[in-house]
Image (cartoon, rainbow, N blue to C red):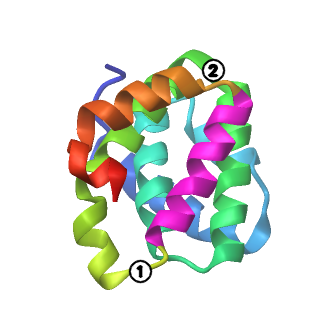
Amino acid sequence: LEGEVDGSLRNRLDGELSEYVHSRDVSEALSLCAARGAVGYLFEAIILRSLEEKSGTTSALCSLLSSVCTAFPRRAANAARAGVRLCLEMLEDVLIDAPQANLRLAEIVATLAIKGTLPLPELCALVREVLPADAESG
């Protein structure tokens, strides 16, 4: 694993994520991602935030994910698996408050698959592992 993120870096990453949604400037986010644990934390924050955001915001956050995948491919692959796993584990609960969350997750997963960060066979195996069999058929 990449490691834990201290409170100061977490606050900076959260602030940068909010700023990015408005500015679409990836430079500061990418520079913060050089710190140990930052890629994993940023992936988790982007994925969780995307589930409750508007479609346009999710698209912007997917663009940031894509940039992080390009800049930090190995760390991004680990973070993608962990972030998507977390999202799948809590998706049923999230759908109660955010009925469009499955569409947002699909956009995120498509971005990760297209970048090659989370290849489709690996994604399918992750879904089968995390979701109960009856959830897949429904």
Comes first in the chain, label 1 or label 2: 2
Report the side of 21 relative to 32 (left or right): right
The residue at 59%/51% (across/down) is 108
Task: Give residue 114's position: percent from left, percent from top.
Answer: 73, 34
Is the residue 102 above or below the residue 136 in the image? below
Residue nearest the observer in this picture, 32 or 45: 45
| Disc marking residue 99 | 1
Q: Which mark is residue 135?
A: none
Q: Quadrant of the C terminus?
A: bottom left
Quarter holding the N terminus? top left
The secondary element bearing badge 2 is classed as helix
Amino acid beneath label 1: Pro
**Where residue 124 sits in the image (x, y, percent)?**
45, 30
Q: Which residues, given as a range, are shown in magenta?
A: 101-115
Q: Do callouts 1 and 2 mark residues in contact (Cβ within 8 Å)?
A: no
Q: Can residue 12 be spotted in the picture?
A: no
Comparing 128 with 37, the one in front is 128
Q: Amino acid at mark 2?
A: Pro
Please give the label number shown on residue 73: 2
**Secondary structure, magenta segment, majority class:** helix
Disc 2 crowd rating (10 Å Cα; few below 14, some 14-19, many 20+) is some
For this rendering, which residue is in front, 117 or 64? 117
Label 1: element kind: loop
Q: Residues within 10 Å of mark 1 (few under 14, many from 20)?
A: some
Alpha-carbon span between mark 1 and mark 2? 31 Å
Camera-near label (1 vs 2) is 1
Q: How far across and how far down the image is residue 52, in percent? A: 45, 75
